Amino acid sequence: MKKKLFTFALIYSLLMGLGFAQSKDEAAVTVAVETLRKAMIDADKVTLENLAAEDLSYGHSNGKIENKAEFVQAIVSGSSDFVSIDLSNQTVKIVDKTAIVRHTFSAATNNNGQPGTIKLTVLLVWQKQKGNWKLLARQTARI
């Protein structure tokens, strides 16, 4: 029991330390990125539409660029179907009302019924609009 309590206290302390290392905006952007990740897996149209800015520019590693409606439709229709998404090496930098997020994006896909995997580096640009962080731009490159 003492070992479990010690382990819990150690993990809690580490997590609290990480929480204080981020500003309020950095933490909010981190939550928005995680919400986007889950919405992409779940093909959650409402959440995707709420997270994306009206002027979204969503760039793929093959050079294709989508606007907000095209991005949401591709996910919801299954032409871009994510079975799982793992994000790693994430950094968040806040500059005024803009957040710059970079991470490695590894995913299992089932695009149009064709299973596959993909590994990308991703740049996300989030903008604070009316108190909420909105995805304004995304660009990827294959690793």
Image (cartoon, rainbow, N blue to C red):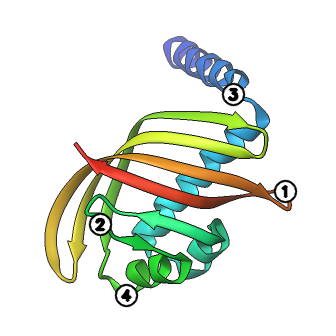
Q: Residue at x 53, y 83 (%)?
A: 69
Q: Label 2 near label 1: C-beta < 8 Å?
A: no
Residue type of the residue flagged with mark 4: Ser
For the residues labelled 3 and 2, the Cα–Cα distance comes to 30 Å
- Crowding near the residue tagged with mark 3, few <14, some 14–19, many ≥20 C-alpha atoms within 10 Å: some
Q: Residue at x 56, y 72 (%)?
A: 48
Residue type of the residue flagged with mark 1: Gly
Q: Which of marks 3 and 1 is nearer the N terminus?
A: 3
For the residues labelled 1 and 4, the Cα–Cα distance comes to 30 Å
- Crowding near the residue tagged with mark 1, few <14, some 14–19, many ≥20 C-alpha atoms within 10 Å: few
Q: Position of residue 120 (x, y in %)?
A: 29, 48
Image quarter of residue 110: bottom left
Image quarter of residue 41: bottom left
Provide the residue designation for mark 3: 22
Q: Position of residue 24 (x, y in %)?
A: 78, 36
SS for callout 4: helix
Query: Closer to the camera: disc 1 or disc 2?
Result: 1
SS for callout 2: strand
Provide the residue designation for mark 1: 131
Provide the residue designation for mark 4: 77
Image quarter of residue 27: top right
Query: Closer to the camera: disc 3 or disc 2?
Result: 3
> Viewed as shown, does residue 80 lie left or right of 76?
left
